[in-house]
Image (tube, rainbow, N blue to C red):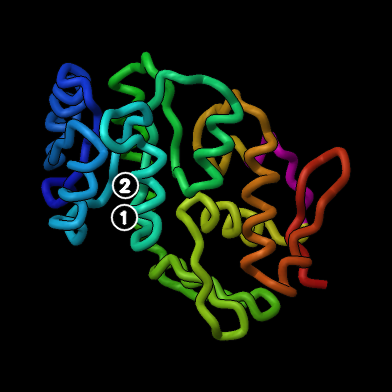
């Protein structure tokens, strides 16, 4: 993984050092920013090589939400938010803005590294190479792109993975718990409304073909083109 660069953004120097030390053990390259403004500056200078961002919420000059908004205007780079808050509404807000993972402080450094490696593997080590057409929705698993009637649509990492999971299980009713465990890749203890929020955004982006994602009352969702 020596070609993978991670930007660590946190105003606490001890926290940055802790994360840096553990990630360096896995041979990641690390860039650091002590506040939001510095994070934006570093990202602008090195966006081509930064493959993932660990982003604290509460910071001076520019908070994590503001940094997230600015980066999402031009990039889909995976972002893991680090926060001392554990409120479900905060997590839902983050997912609405395009967060890929959400880790509350205090956390186990080993768990954080595991989350980082899981995202890196899903995004950059995808060995699949095929395109599948689901009623006019074409998903390219190598390029991680989705087109609707030959027009590309912009999906966040989590939106892409959720849509792909639904498509891979076409015509199967999937419970919210099963979706969380398979798409979020770990036991998510927050409110399952985060799935509903993502589904709403995906349907909107799919346009008329958003109707392919059926709501199964009392269970969850099903992807069906019929």
216, above or below 155, in the image? above
Q: Which residue is mark 2?
A: 120
**Is disc 2 in contact with disc 1, using a CB cutoff of under 8 Å?**
yes
Name the quadrant containing residue 165.
Answer: bottom right
Image location (x, y in percent) of residue 52:
28, 46
Q: Which mark is residue 109?
A: none
Image location (x, y in percent) of residue 187:
55, 27
Image quadrant containing the C terminus = bottom right
Determine whether, in the image, residue 183 is placed left or right of residue 57: right
Name the quadrant containing residue 181.
Answer: top right
Q: Is residue 120 magenta?
A: no
Categorize mark 2 by other alpha carbons within 10 Å: few (<14), some (14-19), many (20+).
some
Q: Secondary structure at mark 2?
A: helix
Q: Which residue is mark 1?
A: 125
Categorize mark 1 by other alpha carbons within 10 Å: few (<14), some (14-19), many (20+).
few
What residue is rendered at 12% in x and 38% in y? 27
């Amino acid at each position: 993984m020596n070609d993978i660069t991670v930007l660590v953004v946190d105003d606490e120097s001890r926290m940055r050092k802790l994360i840096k030390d553990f990630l360096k053990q896995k041979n990641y390259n690390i860039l650091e920013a002590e506040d939001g403004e510095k994070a934006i500056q570093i990202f602008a200078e090195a966006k081509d090589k930064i493959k993932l961002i660990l982003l604290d919420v509460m910071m001076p000059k520019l908070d994590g939400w503001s940094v997230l908004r600015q980066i999402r205007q031009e990039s889909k780079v995976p972002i893991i938010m680090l926060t001392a808050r554990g409120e479900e509404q905060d997590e839902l807000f983050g997912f609405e803005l395009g967060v890929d993972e959400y880790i509350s402080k205090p956390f186990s450094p080993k768990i954080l590294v595991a989350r980082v490696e899981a995202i890196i593997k899903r995004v950059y080590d995808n060995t699949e190479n095929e395109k599948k057409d689901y009623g006019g929705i074409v998903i390219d698993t190598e390029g991680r792109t989705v087109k609707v009637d030959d027009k590309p649509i912009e999906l966040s990492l989590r939106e892409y993975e959720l849509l792909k999971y639904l498509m891979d299980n076409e015509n199967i009713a999937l419970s919210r718990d099963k979706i969380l465990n398979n798409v979020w890749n770990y036991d998510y203890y927050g409110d399952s409304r985060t799935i509903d929020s993502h589904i709403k955004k995906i349907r909107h982006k799919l346009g008329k073909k958003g109707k392919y994602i059926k709501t199964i009352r009392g269970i969850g969702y099903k992807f069906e083109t019929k």
